[in-house]
Amino acid sequence: MNLSEYAASHGLKRVGARPPFFSYLREVWRRRVFAWTLSTYTSEAANARTRLGRWWLILLPTIQAGTYGLIFGLILGSNRPHNFLAFLFTGVFLFSFMSGAFQSGASSIVGNAGLVRSLSFPRILLPISSVIQQFINLWAQLALLLVTLLVTAFDFANLSWQNPIDLDWALFPVVVLLMVLFCSGLAMIAARINAQARDLGKLIPFITRIAFYVSGVFFSLESVLAAWPTVLAIFEFNPFYDFIQLSRGLLVQGYEPSAKLWILCIGWAVITPIVGALYFWKAEEVYGRDD
C-alpha cells in the first residue's frame, strides 16, 4: 500500500481535489450567500469613486441607446423597424445585460486570482456571482425600459394610449429568468476558457461586438435577410437574438412572441447551464494554479 492509498483508507483527501459533481452542487448551494455578497459588494464598489455613483447603470445604456438611435435611425431612414425607439431600447438594454454577464464571467477567475489561491470554496461561485452582479444592475435599466415603453405607447396628440399594455407583459419576468439561467451557463464556459487560455481573453471584446451586429439590436434581421431565408434560419439560432426578439414580442407593439422563440429560449436556458456547470467542474482542480 502506497502513501496515497493509506491516506485514502483513513478518510484523508488531497487538498483541492475535485468532489463528485452532485456533492459539488450541494456545496455551491450551501455557500450561495457568498456569491450574493460578493456580487453586491462588487456592484457597489464599481461606481463608488464616481460622483454619479449607481446612476451610471442607467446613464451608460441610455447614452448608448440614444447614440445608436441617432446614428442608425438616420442611416436606416424609412427602413427603420416599426416602433423604433422601443425596439432599440429593448435590444440595447437586454444585450447589455447578456454581454456584460459574458464579459464579467470570462474574467471572474482571472480577476479574482488572489481569492482563488487563498480560500477553499467552489470556484463556480465566481462566474455565478458575476451574473448576479449584472442582474442587480439590470433592474435599474428595466425600470427605464418600462418608462420608455410607456412613453412610446402614449399618443400625446390625442391624449390616449396608442399601443395598450396587454397580458404579455406579465410573461416578461419569465424571459428574464431564462436569460439569467442562460447567462450563468455562458459565464461558466467563458470563465474556464479564459482561465486556461488567457490569450483568448483578448478576443472577448471582438466576440461581443460581432454578437451585437448579428443579434438585430438596432435593425430587423427579418427585413435585412428576407432574400436569404436559409441564412436567416441560421441566424435565428443565435441565443442573444432569440431572447431579445422574444422580449420584443412580449413588450413592443407590432411584434409577436412565436412558439419557436419560446422553445429556443427555454432550450438555451436549460442546456447552457448544465453544459456550463459540467464543463467548469471538470477543471475545478486547476483554477488558480500557476502553470
Image (tube, rainbow, N blue to C red):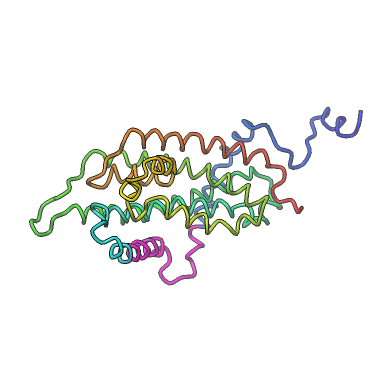
Specify start and end residues of the magenta stretch as a single range: 43-69
**Placement of 215 over or under 13, stated as above or below:** below
Within the image, what quadrant is residue 145 found in?
bottom left
Q: Residue at 49% of width from left, 45% of height from top?
A: 183
- Give the prevailing secondary structure in the magenta stretch: helix
Q: In this view, does 51 lie to the left or right of 1?
A: left
Residue sitting farthest toward the front = 227
Q: Which residue lies furthest to the left in this view?
A: 158
* Towards the viewer: 126 or 268: 268
Could you tell me which residue is drawn at 29 percent across and 42 percent down? 249
Extreme residue in the right direction = 1
Tell me if residue 125 can be seen. yes
Residue 116: give x, y in percent of width and height.
67, 51
Asked whether residue 177 is in view, the answer is: no
Picture coordinates of residue 115, whole percent (x, y)? 66, 54
State whether residue 129 is above or below residue 75. Answer: above
Q: Nearer the viewer, residue 107 or 138?
A: 107
Query: Which part of the image, by quadrant, shows the N terminus?
Result: top right
Number of numbered discs visible in the structure rendering: 0
Whole-percent x, y for residue 29 in the image: 56, 37
Residue 85: quadrant of the picture: bottom left
User: Which quarter of the figure has residue 236?
Assistant: top left
- The question of residue 208 being in magenta is answered with no
Residue 268 lies left or right of residue 9; in this view the side is left
> Is residue 49 inside the magenta stretch?
yes
The residue shown at (48%, 60%) is 44
Q: In this view, does 18 lie above or below 49?
A: above
Q: Where does residue 111 sit, x and y in percent of width and height?
A: 62, 57
